[in-house]
Structures are given as structure tokens and as C-alpha cells.
Amino acid sequence: MFQENASANCSSIITACNEDGAFQTKGHSARILSPEEAERLAKDQVLVSEFKQLKLEKEAQKNWDLFYKRNSTNFFKDRHWTTREFQELKACREFADQKLTILEAGCGVGNCLFPLLEEDLNIFAYACDFSPRAVEYVKKNALYSTERCKVFQCDLTKDDLLENIPADSVDVVTLIFVLSAIHPDKMHLVLKNIYKVLKPGKCVLFRDYGLYDHAMLRFKSGSKLGENFYVRQDGTRSYFFTKEFLSQLFKAEGYEEVVNEYVQRETVNRKEDLRVPRVFLQSKFQKPFR
């Protein structure tokens, strides 16, 4: 049995985070490492060779395709928390039952897309993913309907979204656990691409791995690609964000910061007496009115 525990500092807000009454903290302070954790990270300074890094970048799509081949649609849980965590999905309506157009950038196999379409019948969704295999899984889902969504394969760092989505037509863009999989040098290209299809005054809703998340601390020596950037055994990569880095990234592409905060949770496995600190960054950035 799992239970969520969290301690708040003066700048944090404690909120219920799921149906079983668990709690999490939201705030502007990054997680503080224990002395043992800090020492372990300080020792891990050897980077993966440039040759291997170039190979990982070249084979990024293949590695994600193989990931979905191995895991099918079973790896990620459906994200029914999305509307709860991001009230913007409801609050951005000017009147009840207003039709919303959303873009899920990096939809995977639809774990966020289909719960949203089920919960809100007045949403039309564009959805895209880097992996052709993931896109095919979405199209094979029983809930998939071309009347409710348009799904397509896309490399957000180079494929122009305007080929599939009209300019300035999207009310909300979700960017959930996507940007971390992209090389930091190319992240700005994703934000530039999204900017073109987002309506002025509308927002990008972001959630991804935060600095010192448990997943970051678990990487073994020889997995480090750069500052806060690591490679998993299957060749997929993960970046761990600071709020400062993310803010600078969005603002450089013309967005305005609305919300940008850490979400910290501590999962406790009572049976194994194991505490797992999870850290995410949850943010909202707006495209300015002209």
C-alpha cells in the first residue's frame, strides 16, 4: 500500500493530489538533497562519449519506437488527473459548453488524450507524437474518432505544425512529460513550433520531471549526458528541469510566465519501508495578445 507524505515550507501550498486523500506540496523552492545524495551526484561527473551522444540523437525516434513496441499501451497509466491539476482546461472557456481546440504535443499512446475526450465532450484535439508506432496505437484505440481528434506523427523540433494545424487556432497546448525527452539544445525549437498554432492570449500547460526527482537520483554512473540530462538503458533520454531554466526557455520564445512551480511528493511503501521523493515542474505559459 502506498501513501503520500509531504512537508511544506512557508512558500509551499499543500493540496490533495488523488482520490485516496494523498497530499503534495507546490512551491518555488527546489528539493534539498540529503548529504549522501549530494555526495553521490557530485561524484558522477563522467559524461557519455560524444560519439555515443551523437548516436543517441540520431536514433532517438528508433529508440522511442522500440519502447512502444516492447510496452505497447501498458507502460503509462491513463492520466485522469489532468483536468484536476490544470483547471485552465475548464477555466479558459468564455461560456459554458464552448467548443475548445487543444493540442497534445507528444501524445504517446493516448493516456492523456482519451481521458480528456471522455471527460469533456466539447473538446476537439490535435495530437502528435515522435513515434510512428505510438500514433498507430492511438488510431487503433476504440475511443479514437476523426470527428473528435486528428492524430499525426511529428518531430516537433523540425516538422512544421502548420502542415496539420491552422495558425493561431489552438486554445490550449499540453506539453506533459515530453520536453524532457528532447535534447536541451533543441527544446526551444519545440516552443517556437507550438507558438505558431496557439491563439494569442492562450496557454501552454507544462508538467515534467523536476530537479532531483527520484528518477534522476537512480541513474548509475555512465548515464550522464550533460547537466541534469541522462540516458536510460533503453536509449531514451530524460532531462530534469529547474524552474529558472524552464522560465528562460519559454520567455526567449516570446511567452509570458503565468505559473511556474515545483510539485513535490513523497511516496511511502509501508511494506518495504521505502520513501521515494518525486519532483515535478508544473507550469503555465501564455502567448501574449497582439
Image: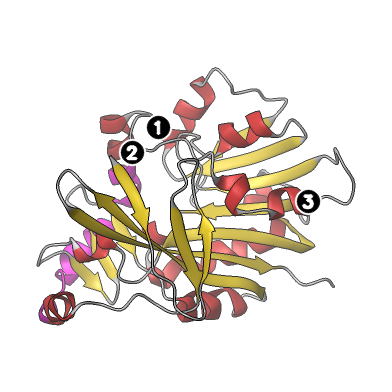
Quadrant of image for the C terminus: bottom right
Q: Tell me, yes or no, whether the highlighted magenta stretch contains residue 44.
A: yes
| Above or below 259: residue 244 | below
Q: What is the C-alpha distance between the residues marked 3 and 1?
A: 27 Å
Give the residues in magenta: 43-64
Q: Nearer the viewer, residue 40 or 148?
A: 40
The disc label shown at residue 65, or none = 2
**Element at label 1:** helix
Q: Nearer the viewer, residue 64 or 163?
A: 64
Rendering coords of residue 255 (x, y %): 66, 73
Look at label 1 and name its amino acid: Arg
Q: What is the C-alpha distance between the residues marked 2 and 1?
A: 6 Å
Residue receiving disc 1: 133
Q: Tell me, yes or no, whether the highlighted magenta stretch contains residue 127.
A: no
Residue at figure coordinates x 48%, y 76% from the top left: 243
Q: Earlier in the sequence, mark 3 or mark 1?
A: 1
Look at label 2 and name its amino acid: Asp
**Element at label 3:** loop
Total marks shown come to 3
| Above or below 238: residue 71 | above
Q: Is residue 273 left or right of residue 134?
A: left
Query: CB of mark 2 within 8 Å of CB of mark 1?
Result: yes
Residue at figure coordinates x 25%, y 77% from the top left: 33
Q: Quadrant of residue 114?
A: top right
| Above or below 64: residue 249 | below
